[in-house]
């Protein structure tokens, strides 16, 4: 401060100000003192810059202080009586209603609201990770299309070659066409021989992505259930006279217009946007070969498995190893079931009920299923009518879609 004051004294001292007094241009001594005048002008400019810098610095310091005062307004001091009143109100809010207060914000006791915020904050990263897992699936699906196209093109070329060979061509031309034909046949045979290995790799790649996709979708649905439960609780509290009276008392002590749930409305908006972008009431079914369709099915909100759609099966059917991997337990005393297969053979199974089965955003509780005995260890998991026959599900084989009329978009659709 002393240094700044001394600088200001030097800048505004009479001797310094005298430097700015110059002779008129028509003075007889202008030419003689031209060099000295330039030096004086330079000194004056430097002085002017110093003055400006100091003044701007002073204004800047003032602005900073004012900004700090605006950003951190002085909070009214509560009296001891007000503090005791608020402590009593806070105690009743927590004990009687499970509500915590932080200044003018209210929060339900528990971790659901915090978990919602954590999920929404992490969601962009989760979506990016899901996109990374989809890339190898897309690459292999493009390769699958290319392989199929090569085979079809070769078959058409072979057909044309055979038509030419039937015309009785000269030997040299005939032999050239035969060599070309054999090369195309060999290429198709090579593709065919590697098809089983390629299909298994593609199936595994798709399965990894679909499991990740259903896990991601499950997180969104879990977040929605939590959000709905929180919203329902706040609605109940708003209708409770005792609770609203406590809120009114706290508002009076704090001299606030009203106390509100902490940022929950913003959470709701962000979640609704996420649902709109990712969830759908139409699930696309995938070709499983031999005129069959399959779909990803999530069991008990945890594990996902590919199941073949079978409208001829009365219930979900699982091989024992698959049931174990999905966490589907066969309780002692489970009823025996005799199943008839397509070839009229019989197989034994145990009847169970799965607490929660989900496809896309559609969930069904307490779904009947059968767990096959060891004779069915190579069987394909089937999605039967115990799930498909529920109200709100429409299966369209022609368009390869499964449409649901009940989806967890906020409140459940009726």
Image (spheres, rainbow, N blue to C red):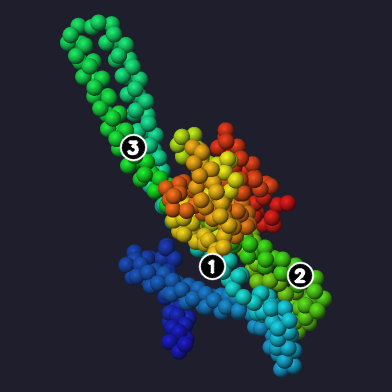
Label 3 Cα neighbours within 10 Å, binned few <14 / some 14-19 / many ≥20: some
Residues under labels 2 and 3: Cα distance?
A: 60 Å
Q: Secondary structure at mark 2?
A: helix
Q: State the image coordinates of residue 277 (x, y, percent, origin top left).
A: 57, 50
Task: Name the residue nearer the viewer: 264 or 320.
Answer: 320
Please identify the residue farthest to the bottom as the structure is shown: 80
Label 1 Cα neighbours within 10 Å, binned few <14 / some 14-19 / many ≥20: few
The residue indicated by pointer 3 is 195
Task: Name the residue nearer the viewer: 54 or 345.
Answer: 345
Q: Secondary structure at mark 3?
A: helix
The residue indicated by pointer 2 is 236
Q: Are marks 1 and 3 in contact (CB under 8 Å)?
A: no
Relative to 53, does residue 175 appear above or below in the rendering?
A: above
Q: State the image coordinates of residue 302 (x, y, percent, origin top left).
A: 51, 60
Please report whichever mark, 1 or 2, sits nearer to the chain's N-terminal start: 1
Q: Are marks 2 and 3 in contact (CB under 8 Å)?
A: no
The residue indicated by pointer 1 is 118
Residue at point 51%, 51% (across, down): 348
In-image side of 213 versus 70 (left or right): left
Please report whichever mark, 1 or 3, sits nearer to the chain's N-terminal start: 1
Whether residue 392 appears in this view of the structure is yes
Q: Nearer the viewer, mark 2 or mark 3?
A: 3
Q: State the image coordinates of residue 308 (x, y, percent, origin top left).
A: 51, 44
Please report whichever mark, 2 or 3, sits nearer to the chain's N-terminal start: 3
Residue at point 35%, 45% (across, down): 201
Q: Nearer the viewer, mark 1 or mark 2?
A: 2
Residues under labels 1 and 2: Cα distance?
A: 25 Å
Q: Secondary structure at mark 1?
A: helix
In-image side of 47 versus 388 (left or right): left
Residue at point 43%, 83% (across, down): 7
In-image side of 408 versus 149 (left or right): right
């Amino acid at each position: 401060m002393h240094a700044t004051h001394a600088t200001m004294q030097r800048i505004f001292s009479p001797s310094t100000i005298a430097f700015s007094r110059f002779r008129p241009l028509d003075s007889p001594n202008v030419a003689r003192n031209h060099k000295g005048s330039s030096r004086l002008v330079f000194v004056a400019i430097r002085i002017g810059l110093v003055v400006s810098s100091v003044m701007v610095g002073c204004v800047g310091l003032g602005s900073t202080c004012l900004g700090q005062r605006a950003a951190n307004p002085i909070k009214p001091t509560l009296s001891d009586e007000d503090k005791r009143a608020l402590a009593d109100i806070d105690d009743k809010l927590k004990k009687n209603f499970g509500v915590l207060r932080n200044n003018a914000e209210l929060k339900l006791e528990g971790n659901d609201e915090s978990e919602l915020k954590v999920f929404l904050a992490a969601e962009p990263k989760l979506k990016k990770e899901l996109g990374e897992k989809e890339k190898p699936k897309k690459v292999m699906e493009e390769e699958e299309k290319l392989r199929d196209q090569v085979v079809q093109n070769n078959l058409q070329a072979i057909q044309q070659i055979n038509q030419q060979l039937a015309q009785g061509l000269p030997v040299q031309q005939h032999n050239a066409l035969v060599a070309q034909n054999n090369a195309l046949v060999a290429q198709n045979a090579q593709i065919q021989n590697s098809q089983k290995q390629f299909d298994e790799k593609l199936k595994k790649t798709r399965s990894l992505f679909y499991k990740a996709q259903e896990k991601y979708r499950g997180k969104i649905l879990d977040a929605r259930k939590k959000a709905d439960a929180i919203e329902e609780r706040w609605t109940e509290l708003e209708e409770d006279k005792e609770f609203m009276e406590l809120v009114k008392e706290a508002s009076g002590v704090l001299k606030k217009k009203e106390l509100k749930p902490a940022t929950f409305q913003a959470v709701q908006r962000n979640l609704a946007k996420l649902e709109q972008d990712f969830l759908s009431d139409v699930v696309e079914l995938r070709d499983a070969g031999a005129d069959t369709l399959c779909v990803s099915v999530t069991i008990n909100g945890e594990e996902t498995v590919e199941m073949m759609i079978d409208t001829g099966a009365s219930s979900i059917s699982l091989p024992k190893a698959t049931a174990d991997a999905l966490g589907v337990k066969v309780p002692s005393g489970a009823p025996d079931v005799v199943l008839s297969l397509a070839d009229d053979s019989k197989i034994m199974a145990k009847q169970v009920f799965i607490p929660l089965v989900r496809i896309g955003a559609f969930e069904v509780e307490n779904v009947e299923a059968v767990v096959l005995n060891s004779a069915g260890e190579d069987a394909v998991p089937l999605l039967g009518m115990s799930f498909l026959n529920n109200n709100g599900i429409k299966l369209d084989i022609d368009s390869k879609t499964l449409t649901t009329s009940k989806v967890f978009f906020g409140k459940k659709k009726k």
